[in-house]
Image: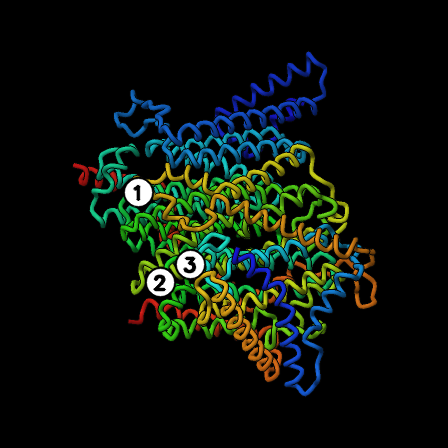
Amino acid sequence: MMSLLQACFIVLFAPFLQGVIKRLKARMQGRTGPSIWQPYRELRKYFHKGAVVSDQASIVTRLVPYGQFALIFSAALTLPLFTVDRQTLLASGNLFLFIYLLGFARLLTALLGMDSGSAFGGMGVSRDLFVALLVEPTVFLAILSAGLLSKGFSFAGITLHLLSHPGQGLTLTTLLAAAALLMIVITETGRLPIDNPDTHLELTMIHEGAILDLSGRALGLMSLGAWMKQLLWISVFFDTCLPYGMATDTAPNDVLYGVIIWVGKVLLFGVVLAFIESVTAKMRLFTVPRFLTLALSLSLFALLSNYVGA
Amino acid sequence: MVLAHVSTIHPIYFLSGLTLRNHYVLMYISYNIIIYNDLEMADVQRIVHVSINLATVAFSVGILFLGWSGLEHPTLLFAHPLFSDIFSTSFFTLNLATVPLSSVFLMTLGVLGVLSAIYGIGYGEVYRARFEGAWLDVGVFLFIAAMAVVFLAGNAFTFLFGWEMMSFVSYLLVVYESERPEVNMAGVLYLAMTQIGTVFLILAFYLLHQFTGSYDFAVFVHLARTLSPVLQSVIFLFTFVGFALKAGIMPLHIWLPRAHPAAPSHVSALMSGIMLKTALYGLLLVNLYWLSPTVWWGVLFIVLGGSSAVLGAFHATQETDIKRILAYSSIENMGLLFMVVGISIAAFALREWTIAGVALCATIYQAMNHAAFKSLLFHAAGSMIHGTHERSLNFLGGLLRRMPYTSIAMAVGLLSVAAVPPFNGFMSEWLVFLASADLARTNLHNVVGLFAAIALFALLFTGALVALMAARIFGVGFQGEGRSPGARAAHEAPFAMRLSLLMGALYALLLGLFPAFIVNALQLTLPEPLRFSPVHLWYTGNLFAISKLPFILLFLLVGGGFFVFLLLRLFIGKEQRHIAPTWTCGGERMAFMSYSATGFSQPVARTFRSLMIPVARGYMYRPAWDFVLKTAQYFRRIQNGSVRSYLVYLFVTVIVLLIVVR
């Protein structure tokens, strides 16, 4: 029940975070920027508008937006956000399940991008999957090495372990894993220096390329899905590295406290993201692997520290 | 007409005396039918073709039931000494028996046999005009029978007999389209490699016999564990080389990406789906059921399997020929299987029984899944080639609208191979994950744990590569617009092929939907100490156990998507859609504008180009070949063409033999 509530919270809160980041970024760059409620307005607009569909498009274009949304929602069910509930809805080896659910969503998005037969779609999809090649193992290794000390490989288990042994959060392993995860979160949320969320320039876009041919409800759902994914990855970072302040039961007071802390943490992370976006330049596509291999090496060291250290 | 038949010399004719006789019987029957029924020759051929395939279906169903009954009650089917009047050895004994492990593989073989034979009814039509299609059908039947003998073998002779029979028949099937030059080359390479593998197997069985005094597998089970560790390691190495060759593990894989695409598609499906599994079966039998493994065996498995998985998946993202992609994907999957066997062996050696059991269970489950989806993929690829006459992804496209059944089958196969939940590939990879992660966790501060973690890394990296491969096949081949006249004029496969594709897709889906049932059944196949209670596996205390997981996921995926659809529909209303051409920056639209398969994977090729270095060719096969040629040069000196010197050689040899033997 609690996980259902948390997942719904993700759906409702994701556009807000996007709005906040955009606004902050604009402020840091000396612009006024759109209102923080702008993403909600955009969604409203997309959902009310009709759609223009390519003559090449098949059933894939009709189904995938809904499927992708459902998958990201299912992934949200496996994560503890503001309370650790032992009884998470999906079985407890869920680190693997989480990554593969998002992988499925990515695969569906890829098919969607190829569906209109446009070169932009293919380009975005090809790049997206290419970046994923390094992202998926890295994020897995990072979480695994942070979680090796806890029993079972669920986010709930890792979080509970950290909450009951707060000192574990400062070990070399966790710090290295945190650094790797941070880099991955930046990549996975489609932000600078990997991807630029604010552009439709064919030379730079990754995620925007895949959804370029969409309009109407499909575009709304895909955008909402992308924002939810962003929030999910931020939550993954907090679950594995900084779960402090999270409730461990479902008592209303504790949960309320957990919500407040969580929102604070997420917004703080948003500030960090906006700051990074304002001070870095976009990388060329082929320098991205260097960035990601750095993250990969960090997570490998995190893993090694489990086997070599004291 | 009849004479024309016989005069066409084709490799299939050399199958065996038995089939040659069959051929005459066949001709005789058809001749009579012509005389008495006034049928056209084409009709006769058609009847023969369909009836042989139906016989294969019946035979496969028989194998399926044999496996089913053998799972719970191991039975000795047949034991009879051959040539006992000529040889005094007990070696030549035909011994057929089922054990639980082989039963699982037999059932898989049965299902695949049914699917391929049904598929063959439709697919053979293409070949009937060119050769006698009936020979292909007979070959497929013999191929399935040979593999059944391998799985049923109860002693070394039967196993090797089945093994060689399987290799030989599959060689003939590979060179079936021998008018294509590359096919013959692929066949020769395949035959040579597989024979080298057999040599190692014979050596291993010889050693086992020398030290246990028997050829019976039942004896090996009891006695092989008592052999000295060094001897066991030697036997392990021999079987490892022999079976890894058949399984296409890098660097022994060079035959596989050539041979699999060369064969007709339903033969490729059988070869990839189940013939590679015979190697896995042999390895499991020797290493986990007979010998008592040591840790370094497991490490060898993990290292070679993991690198095969990654390299195979990488090459699968680079090839453009659809069947070559699938062949490399088979190498990748065999690599994964070897990796999990490695986890199981390492855990076995460390006396982590539960982990070893889970890993072994995962291996067999993954093998079943791979058989299901890889045969489905090869069948779908065959139907693509059948419908478009194009093999290269770069010249396909837009098949989703023209070939709906093939597309569904391909989609199911690709989603399974990409291991996305709740498809079958995911369920078995989940078990792989559980076993490896547990081994990594229980062996902190021990190097073995690190290897388990590396195996997980390989699993995930492979998974990402395979996702790219899947998106590439479907996105380039099935979506967008056709890039060649063949693709634009594609037609759907005939009924038998469609039926087989849909059945295969259903089979793959069913394997994914009932993981708990399958795992419970697979428990029966595990050696006694490795049995685990599923309590260990699913970490009870969860609201939903894994038996319900696929259904929950399915419900979330379908129900959730539908819920959102309804919500939007109810609160906002029906969406206005209108069709417009894809935006092409104002230019005229051309099919070649969309991303090609080569372009799609170009970033990967560029970044990971170091994976493309032909290490095996440069450092193994080339030097080995040079060595053979050089040695041959030396031997040529004694081959001087003079009869007198040959007589001297004979004389010397006889004298030496007399001295040595006496």
Q: Disc 3 marks which residue? A: A153
Residue B459 position in % (x across, y down):
46, 57
Secondary structure beneath dot 1 equals helix
Quarter assignment of residue A275: bottom right
Chain assignment, label 1:
B
Considering only order in the chain, which callout, 1 or 2, is on the residue closer to the N terminus? 1
Residue plotted at (52% across, 74% down) = A265
Q: Quadrant of the C terminus of chain A?
A: bottom left
Tell me if residue B593 can be seen. no
The amino acid type, in three-letter code, at marker 3 is Phe
> Callout 3: 10 Å neighbours few (<14), some, many (20+)?
many
Disc 2 to disc 1: CB gap under 8 Å: no
> Which subunit holds the residue at mark 2?
B
User: Which marked residue is nearer to the observer: mark 3 or mark 2?
Assistant: 3
Asked if marks 1 and 3 touch (Cβ < 8 Å), the reply is no
Nearer to the camera, B413 or A212: A212
Residue with the mark numbered 1? B204
Name the residue beneath numbered marker 2: B450
User: Count of labels shown?
Assistant: 3
Q: How far across and down, in percent of the image, does residue B450 sit?
A: 35, 62
Assign a secondary structure to mark 3. loop
Name the amino acid type tagged 1. Ala
Nearest the viewer among B119 and B209 is B119
Residue drawn at 43 percent across, 70 percent down: A299
